[in-house]
Image (cartoon, grey):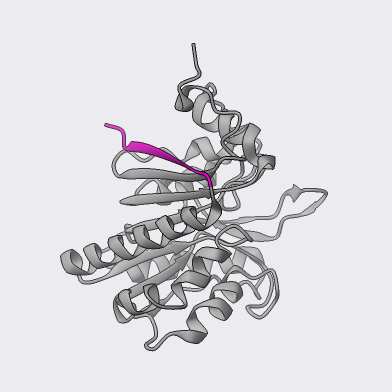
Amino acid sequence: MTGKTVVLIFDDLPGLYDVAAERLVYLAKKAVAGRGRFCLALSGGGTPRPLFERLARPPYLDQLPWSQVALFWGDERCVPPDHPESSFGQFNQLVLAHLPAPPGQVYRIRGEWEPAAAAADYTEQLQQAAGSGQPWPRFDLALLGMGEDGHVASLFPGPMSETESSRPAIAVTAEYAGRPARRVTLTPPVFNDARHILFLVTGAGKAEALAAVLEGPPDPARWPAQRIRPAQGLVMWLVDEAAACSLRQLRGEGG
């Protein structure tokens, strides 16, 4: 059994981020009504920033059941939480600082620690959040972006390690973009267990990767975003025209 994939292409960025915010609010309300908690895995980087800015102001600020939201992060750079590159720091500055009521739980990757220690600590946090002896909670929504090389979270191009398929959180210390990565990331089994996955992809620089991931042959070592293939649940891609310019089949141009 495989999950369902939906791709929506937007003429304008405000429309894309409005739909993302509305989707997040809908899923939060649905999860709280059905299970009493909304488990949300957040992404970092610049792409989700406009979404976070929307969540920090009405109407979305008032619609989200913040006291029943459990926050997690898909990955984190190993920097202090107040560092400009901290994924937690970005969300804390843009959203948490403006909330009328704090989320029910915040599970932060301790980026100020060494990667291996931070990954081990996050693994323990995931187990505690899951309860019932499970290794991680099933996310109601995992928010993801994609790099120009097809990387997702901190899963980068290259051979997939054994730990990537056997542990919920791993340290990433191999060299990336000319320097040691020093990151912690969730792994494909955790993302693929989510009820819903929402990709936000914008910009012409990501067009080649997007076309390869969505329409190209399977090559998850080259295009890590292809590792996100949930057996159940919905994967929704919200992409702008620039990022979608190389798509053919999804735009009805394929032969």
Give residue 82's quadrant in the image.
bottom right
Near-viewer residue (69 or 95): 95
Q: Main secondary structure of the magenta part?
A: strand
Near-viewer residue (150 or 184): 150
Residue furthest front in the image:
11
For the record, the magenta segment spans: 1-11
Q: Work out whether residue 159 can be spotted.
A: no
Give the residue drawn at x 30%, y 44%.
Answer: 233
Give the residue drawn at x 35%, y 57%.
Answer: 23
Give residue 184's quadrant in the image.
bottom right
Q: Work out whether residue 185 can be spotted.
A: yes
Q: Is residue 184 part of the magenta span, yes or no?
A: no
Residue 218 in percent (x, y) is at 52, 25
> In the picture shown, does residue 49 fall above or below 248?
below
> In the picture shown, does residue 229 fall above or below 181?
above
Give the residue drawn at x 31%, y 33%.
Answer: 2
Residue furthest right in the image:
178
Q: In the rendered view, does 204 fall on the left or right side of 162?
A: right
Q: In the rendered view, does 208 fall on the left or right side of 195?
A: right
Q: How many marks?
A: 0
Is the N terminus in the top left, top right, bottom left or bottom right quadrant? top left
Residue 138 in percent (x, y) is at 32, 57
Near-viewer residue (196 or 131): 196
